[in-house]
Image: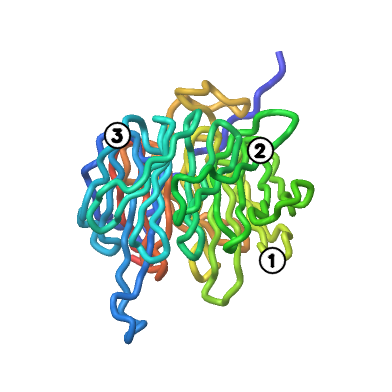
């Protein structure tokens, strides 16, 4: 029988900078996605910002909170299935949610009223607003990227099939500009679609590949002005320069992103956070090739961007970390877990 290399020792929570996060209860099932959205409350004073935090959850009830305190603001009630994705538009006036009930809902983010319901033919996993708030992109198990025009909500959406050879489920989508949408596939490819191009041979403009099914994708403009795409897939977090399409860094993690988890880059571009499944194995997948006990990873990790070195490791959640994002000011970050809670952590405790 061939010898099996022993699994490396699992990381232990750090004692340096140990902190007690703000716990935000309210959800009753696993979290699926988090998004921060900052707006200026006074057009004459750009320094006065207010930040909101919206959360998608399998309990069918996406919620809106204050991004600084975690205080509950409201709940968008109406979905009949797990909510996989949630996004506020850039003005924080509209909310879009994608659900396992085969629909996408558009809400008034002020009143919580449902404005539109867009039916799909399968589970919808992702939704995102265009930069001008005029259009909404959706994707999911159908493998079709749909673009809805908010000025004509009853009009048939534009549709872009990810592959003419096989069905490729879409896990995440992000608008790059008002004409280009990035669609992350379970085949490990990120496709750039020009949704205003009428010539079908020219609609797919670029493809980036990470090799494994993509669990999370974040597009961020750093404080330096550089735009970075962060991708969590397989056992790696990979970073791309979105302008050139060149891979900047790719770091192997002590966790995997096969069924859960994600990553988020700090606005400075100097470090990133990640959470996911235990690399040695999980209760859902069984023991991995590397050996190790069955179980789930409950930790929140902070890594150095340049080297991939683990800087911090925090314990707090009672279930695997399924989603996480930095606050736009970089002073804190939010994590959502299978335990049904959101936790707010300080970047420099």
**Which of the two residues, 123 or 198, is positioned nearer the viewer here?**
198
Q: Residue tagged by mark 3?
A: 59
Q: Residue tagged by mark 2?
A: 161
| Contact (Cβ within 8 Å) of mark 3 with mark 2 | no
> Of tags 1 and 2, which is closer to the observer?
2
Q: How many marks?
A: 3
Report whether residue 114 is seen. Answer: yes
**Which of the two residues, 140 or 2, is positioned nearer the viewer here?**
140
Q: SS for tag 3?
A: loop
Marks 1 and 2, Cα distance to the nearest angstrom?
24 Å
Q: Quarter holding the C terminus? A: bottom left
Q: SS for tag 2?
A: strand
Marks 3 and 2, Cα distance to the nearest angstrom?
30 Å
Residue placed at 67% from the left, 36% from the top? 187
Relative side of 333 to 129, left or right = left
Residue placed at 40% from the left, 70% from the top? 329
Residue 297, given in percent of the width and then of the height, sits at 43, 37
Compared with 319, 12 (above or below) is below
Relative side of 281 to 343, left or right = right
Q: How busy is the neighbourhood of tag 1: few (under 14 within 10 Å), some, or many (20 plus)?
A: few
Q: How busy is the neighbourhood of tag 3: few (under 14 within 10 Å), some, or many (20 plus)?
A: some
């Amino acid at each position: 029988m061939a010898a099996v290399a022993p699994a490396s020792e699992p990381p232990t929570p750090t004692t340096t900078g140990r902190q007690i996060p703000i716990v935000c209860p309210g959800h009753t099932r696993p979290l699926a996605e988090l998004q921060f959205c900052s707006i200026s409350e006074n057009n004459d004073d750009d320094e006065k910002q207010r930040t909101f935090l919206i959360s998608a959850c399998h309990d069918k009830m996406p919620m809106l909170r204050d991004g600084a305190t975690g205080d509950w603001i409201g709940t968008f009630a109406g979905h009949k299935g797990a909510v996989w994705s949630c996004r506020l538009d850039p003005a924080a006036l509209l909310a879009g949610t994608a659900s396992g009930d085969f629909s996408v809902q558009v809400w008034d983010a002020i009143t919580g009223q449902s404005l539109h319901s867009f039916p799909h033919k399968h589970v919808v996993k992702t939704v995102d607003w265009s930069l001008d708030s005029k259009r909404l992109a959706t994707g999911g198990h159908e493998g079709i990227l749909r673009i809805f025009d908010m000025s004509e909500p009853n009009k048939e959406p534009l549709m872009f099939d990810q592959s003419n050879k096989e069905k490729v489920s879409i896990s995440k989508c992000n608008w790059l500009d008002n004409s280009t949408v990035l669609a992350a596939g379970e085949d490990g490819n990120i496709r750039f679609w020009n949704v205003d191009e009428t010539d079908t041979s020219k609609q797919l403009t670029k493809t980036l590949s990470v090799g494994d099914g993509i669990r999370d994708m974040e597009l961020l403009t750093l404080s330096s002005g550089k735009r970075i795409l962060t991708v969590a897939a397989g056992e790696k977090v990979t970073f791309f320069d979105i302008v050139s399409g060149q891979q900047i860094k790719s770091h192997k993690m002590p966790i995997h992103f096969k069924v859960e988890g994600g990553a988020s880059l700090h606005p400075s571009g100097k470090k990133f956070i990640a959470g996911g499944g235990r690399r040695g194995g999980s209760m859902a997948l069984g023991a991995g090739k590397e050996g190790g006990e069955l179980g789930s990873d409950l930790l929140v990790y902070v890594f150095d961007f340049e080297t991939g070195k683990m800087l911090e490791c925090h314990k707090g959640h009672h279930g695997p970390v399924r989603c996480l994002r930095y606050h736009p000011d970089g002073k804190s970050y939010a994590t959502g877990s299978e335990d049904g809670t959101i936790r707010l952590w300080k970047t420099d405790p």
